[in-house]
Structures are given as C-alpha cells and as structure tokens.
Amino acid sequence: MSSDLVTKSLADLSSLIERREVSPVELTRAMLAQVDQHSDALKAYISIYHERALQSAADAEADIAKGHYRGRLHGIPMGIKDNMSFAGQVTTMGSKIHRDFVSDHDATVVERLRRTGAVFLGKLNLHEYALGVTTDNPWYGTCRNPWDLDKTPGGSSGGSAAAVASHLSVVSLGSDTSGSIRIPAAMCGVVGLKPTYGRVSKFGVFPEAWTLDHVGPITQTVTDAAILLDAISGYDVHDPASLDLPPTRTAEALSSAVSGLVIGVDDEYFYADVDDDVAARSRAVIAGLEELGAIVRPVTIGDSQHYEYALTVIDTAESTAVHHANLRDRPQDFGDDVRLLLECGELPSAVDYLKAQQVRYRLRDQMRAVFNQVDVLIAPTVPVRCPAVGESITTLNGRQVETGDALMRLIGPASLLGLPSLSLPAGVIDGMPVGLQIIGPPLGEQRVLDTGLACVFHGLRCDARSGDVKVPVL
C-alpha cells in the first residue's frame, strides 16, 4: 500500500490519517523513499530532513493515537521552498551567498504549518533568489520537469511544483512575485494559487520585491490548495503588508456551482500572441462553463500595453535594492543570469520607479471597473508550450520569442495588482501539461477556487494525470 499512498491527495490522506487507517510514519517513509529514488534526476530538493521528518511523523502519530488530531495537515509530509526561514536549519535562497545561512526563527508560514502538525521533508529548489522563471540553478543543480527531464519545470518555484507533480511532496509552498507559483504549476501540471497581496504573511521569506511578493500553495487539487491556504493565511503583526483579516475558510465553503457565474474574457491581452493550441484549451473550458449556465462577457482590462513596463520597472528596481550591497562587493557570487538582471535593476531612476507606481495605481482603478462587470477572468497561464531546459528562445506559432518574457506576460496583471490567481491543469499538448489561469478581484480567493473546482467537477479539463500520459520519472 505504501507505493500507492504517495499518489493520494492531501484531502484523501488526511481522512485516512484521521481514521487511523494510515500511519503518518508509514506515509513519511514512503515519501522519503520516493524522494531518495528520484532526487538526483529531478533536483527538486536542496535539503532533505530524513531523521527530523521521521521523528515529526512519529510525534504526529502518537498525538493522533491519543485523540489529539489537529486537522487536515496533521502528519502530512511536505517540502517548502528554500527561501522560507526554518529555525535551526540552513535556508540557502538557492544562492551561493546564503549557502550557510541559518535563521533563528521560522517564517510565519512555517510556524503556522508547524502548529498544524505538518511533517517537513526538506527545502525545495528554486531559481537563485527566486529571480528567474526556469529553476536553472548554478549552485544546487538544474531542476527538471518530471513529465520530461529535458523540459523546464518553470520557476522560480520549480522545485515545489516538480516535487508535487512527481509525488515527492504531498503539497508544497512557493512564492510568487512575477509568476513564480503559477508558471511552474502550469509547466508541471499541478495547481498553484497566488493569493491576494497581504492575505498570507511574507515574514521570514527572503524578499524579491516587497510590493509584489506573495506566498501560496502548490498542490495536486483545488481542494488541497484551499486547505493549505486556510492553514497559512491570516493577519501577522510582523509583516507590514499583512491585511488585518482572519484566516480564510475556503475549504469548507467550496462549491462547484456554475449557473450565473460571469466570466470575463479579454481577447486583446490574454489571447493575443498565444500558441493556437494553448488558447484553444482555455477557450474550450470557457465554452464548457457557458453550457452549464455561466455567462461569458468580453472585457478590456485597461491600458494593457503598460502592464509589462510597470511590472518590470518595479520588480527589477526593488530586487536590486535588496541585493545592492552584494552586487557591488561580490558580483562574482551571483549566477550569470541573476547578476545581469540585478545590473539592469540599477538602471531605472527614482522618477522611472515612481512613474511605474503611478501606472500601477491607474491600472488598479481600471481593473476594479472590470470586476464590477464580471466575477472572474479566465485565460491561459502561459502563452507558449513548455520550453526545454536552457532554451532562451522558444517558438510561438512559428516565430521565435524570448522565453522568459513569454512565460511572464500573462501572469503580469495579477502580479502587479496583487489579485488572487489560480493556475490549474487544462490538458496536455505534445505530452506536456498546459495551464489555465483564473483571476479574481481582491480577496476573491473563494470565487477563484470555486471556479477552479467547477472546472474539475464538471470534467471541463483534461486531467494532466489521466489517460496514457505518465510522468517518466515515476
């Protein structure tokens, strides 16, 4: 039974553990065996906590036996992205500079998961300092996509998505500044949720760009994403951007109802310069929802030509401010791509940065008007098929485009405006997963998750794990 356990969802495993039909120790042993078997090929983990994980699992098992079941994460083994502080253990940020950094405190999300009784398997690989979309890491190995080891898992949370897709972690956490949860979720055929900005604390998570950073779940299912969001969300006095709100309770309120749902579709932005087959997958889901009673409404999200400008200036300027001293004093200790990105971040002036923020405010007002007309926006997560590892130029409908720019373009509006955004599998093209993106208004996590659940419940997507498609590494 152990080999079957690792493929089960969080929701299924939690029920088995609560009924004491599955032992947290048995589950953790099975998961660690999976990690040990495939970690060299995938490079999904940077650190693996064998003894610590087994002891935590034994503690969880003992508590549950005494009737002290803490909830649906109790005894669940998972990895977390290695830019989240873990007290007493190395947190590398995927970098050479922080190779030996040990925090004396947990990130708030780690602390909250620890209280649930979750079992930490280790720390997951990422693009260096989360500053990239491929997880080609020069210090800890290039992370591979479990669907095809020659393909990128996306980034920067590539290790988190690859681990969930290949059953090396039941669920995981990623961070998302310019798509770093949703891009790898799309590339690896899993579910990734970027919550509303400030909904989940960033305290103890190494910053990329402080006005853009988010933390969120990467999971097998929409239900699992809701469970994990509910566990990590809520106000945190240690995070100045934290919203003064209680934890979400989305899992218990999930609904697959579709009738009357108003779906916005912006053809000018979200379906322009998109691979024809990728666009067709997204449109097929929308058509299916419409047949079930949803209302589809054409919209324009505003001055869409300015999204990339504002996001690029703000992200690079804030990122470079974080790393300015090390870039000046030890530039050789950054990977080539990250060093170039940070050097570019030295170029915008204060005037450029403030203009970008002014554009952001205007775009926020325009998007607010859109969500006065619709409940959600639906679009592809990324406009291209999954690129190969190291592929800086990819093909889009027969022409060549820059890979990084293409992967980030469609996730830009939700990133810049801090909107909740869900990526879920929308089928397979040429043997690789395709992602569907559902964007909601501020604090609209429930609406976004419900829409995602409706897509699954009503069979409107081709499950990325179904049919004859198999993850090669398994």
Image (tube, rainbow, N blue to C red):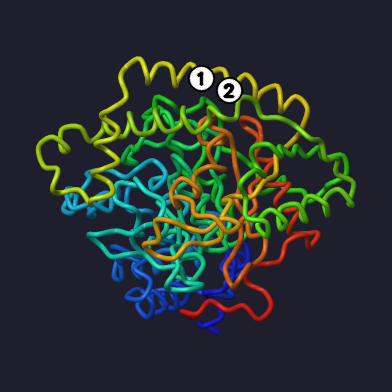
Label drawn at residue 240: none
**x and y percent of residue 431 in the render?**
59, 73
**x and y percent of residue 190 in the render?**
57, 61
Disc 2: which residue: 363
> What amino acid does circle 2 point to?
Leu
**x and y percent of residue 433 in the render?**
59, 65
Circles 2 and 1 in contact, beta carbons < 8 Å: yes
Q: Is residue 419 above or below residue 353?
A: below
Q: Is residue 70 above or below residue 376?
A: below
> What amino acid does circle 1 point to?
Val
Q: Secondary structure at mark 2?
A: helix
Q: Secondary structure at mark 1?
A: helix
Q: What's the CA distance linking mark 2 and mark 1?
A: 6 Å
Disc 1: which residue: 359
Toward which corner of the image does residue 106 lie, by quadrant? top left
Q: Nearer the viewer, residue 1 or 194?
A: 194
Q: Is residue 235 above or below residue 35?
A: above
At 50% from the left and 48% from the top, the residue drawn is 406
At 42% from the left and 72% from the top, the residue drawn is 150
Q: In the image, 190: left or right of 389?
A: right
Q: In the image, 158: left or right of 433?
A: left
Quadrant assignment for the N terminus: bottom right
